[in-house]
Every structure is written in structure tokens, then in C-alpha cells.
Image (tube, rainbow, N blue to C red):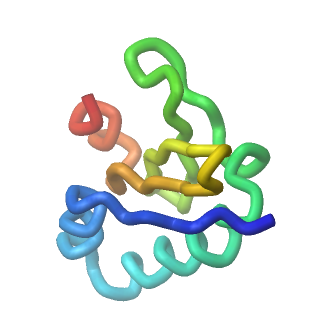
Amino acid sequence: MSYKVAWHTEALEDLARLDKSRAREIVGKVDDHLSEDPLALGKPLKGIFRGLFRYRCGDYRVIYSIDRKEELLSVLTVGHRKNVYRRAR
């Protein structure tokens, strides 16, 4: 079962700020790997981020939510690990 991937506007802007090869790598990993089993591959977040998940792509993190009923994976933001959690609030 593969989830449909929806990219939030902020996530697309985040990707546009990255170099093209890094952005392609992240999009490829999300489309090819994460969309297949987002619950097993991602890590659930805690605290104010409860209900969201993160997926690791090297030093970058993809913050996303899952709608199991609709089989939809919504990518909310993408960023370097030292900054992504500050911006996602």
C-alpha cells in the first residue's frame, strides 16, 4: 500500500532554497521510500509536535503528517536538523 504524497507550500519553498541535487535526493527518498511505509520509516515526534513524524535524509529532516483514512502523507516542512524544529512550530 502506497500513500499519496502532498507537498505543503512551505515544504516546496524549503526545497527551492536547497541546492538542486539535495532537493532531488530528498524528493526521491520521500516518493520512493517514505510513501511506501511512512509509519515504519518515520519517527513520531513528541511534545508540541505530537501527531507529526520526521524522516531523516542525512543532515536534513522531513516533517510530515499522515492521514491513514485517506492514505495521504502531507509533507509540511523540510530543513537542516539544527533549524527545522524551530521553524515547524
Q: Relative to residue 74, is residue 85 depicted above or below?
A: above
Q: Residue at x 40, y 77 (%)?
A: 22
Between residue 19 and residue 8, name the one nearer to us. 8
Q: Residue at x 38, y 16 (%)?
A: 48
The reply, left or right, for residue 89 in relation to residue 41 is: left
> Is 22 situated above or below 21?
above
Q: Which quadrant of the figure has residue 73?
A: bottom right
Q: Pick the quarter of the image with the C terminus.
A: top left
Please give the name of the residue rendered at 29% of the width and 70% of the height, measured from the top-left corner.
15
Q: Quadrant of residue 1?
A: bottom right
- In the rendered image, the vertical position of residue 18 relative to residue 39, given as above or below: below
Residue at 44% x, 46% y is: 63
Q: Position of residue 69 (x, y in %)?
A: 65, 45
Q: Position of residue 64 (x, y in %)?
A: 47, 47
Q: Along the horizontal axis of the image, is 20 left or right of 9?
A: right
* Figure disc tally: 0
Pick the residue in front: 15 or 5: 5
Place residue 81 in its image quadrant.
Answer: top left
In the figure, 49 relative to 33: above or below? above
Q: Nearer the viewer, residue 64 or 61?
A: 64
Question: Residue 42 at x, y = what percent?
Answer: 65, 45
How far across and how far down the image is residue 76, in percent?
36, 50
Looking at the picture, tell me which residue is in the foreground, 39 or 55. Answer: 39
Give the residue furthest to the front. Answer: 69
